[in-house]
Amino acid sequence: MNPSRPYLRVDIDKIFIQVKAVMHQEAVIRGNGNAQYRDCYTGKILNGGDPYDYEHIYGSEWVHTTYKHLLTDPQIALVVNCQENVGVTLRKINQSKGKTNPEIWFANDINIRNNDIDINWAMGNIQKAKKAIEKMVKELSR
């Protein structure tokens, strides 16, 4: 394992496509034929046709940079795409947050106000994602 290897999304994207497909199937069932999600940052209901994106709460590049000294790229792909780290949010929020660590992005009151974030809901999801990532890293790096 080369801890100085570059960030590549190949393995991550393969799993992300599968995760999104499963999430979409579940959302269609939940919405009785129309995809229905709960935004991972605002808590609002999003329906098929709304401008939403599937979102890595902790971005794939951040996970890669943080754990590449411990994990292989296929292992990192599993961690990035764990159920707790993939959510759905409005496209404008996803684009605004970009690759920023969510703890830093959500610490900015302007981001909260401009995007109508439910900070308790968002931080709950961020904490779940972080805990799941740390648990998986611990298990995979044994």
Image: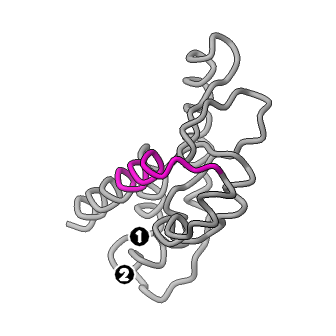
Considering the numbered disc 1 on the image, is that residue within a helix, a strand or a loop? Answer: loop
Which is more toward the observer, 123 or 37?
123
Which is more toward the observer, 114 or 100?
114
**Residue at position x 66%, y 32% in the image:** 46
Q: In x, y percent, where is residue 1?
A: 39, 80
Looking at the picture, does residue 83 appear above or below residue 96? above
Which quadrant, please, contains the C terminus? bottom left
Location of residue 114 (image quadrant): bottom right
Nearer to us: label 1 or label 2: 2
Q: Give the residue number, with chain letter if any, for mark 2.
A: 69
Identify the residue at the far bottom of this view: 4
**Residue at position x 44%, y 64% in the image:** 76
Give the residue type that dot 1 points to.
Answer: Thr
Looking at the picture, does residue 19 appear above or below residue 129? above
Q: Is residue 3 magenta?
A: no
Give the residue type that dot 2 points to.
Answer: His
Looking at the picture, does residue 42 appear above or below residue 71? above
State whether the magenta stretch is mostly helix, strand or loop: helix
Considering the numbered disc 2 on the image, is that residue within a helix, a strand or a loop? Answer: loop
Q: In x, y percent, where is residue 136?
A: 30, 57
Residue 72 bears which disc, if any? 1
Looking at the picture, does residue 13 appear above or below residue 76? above
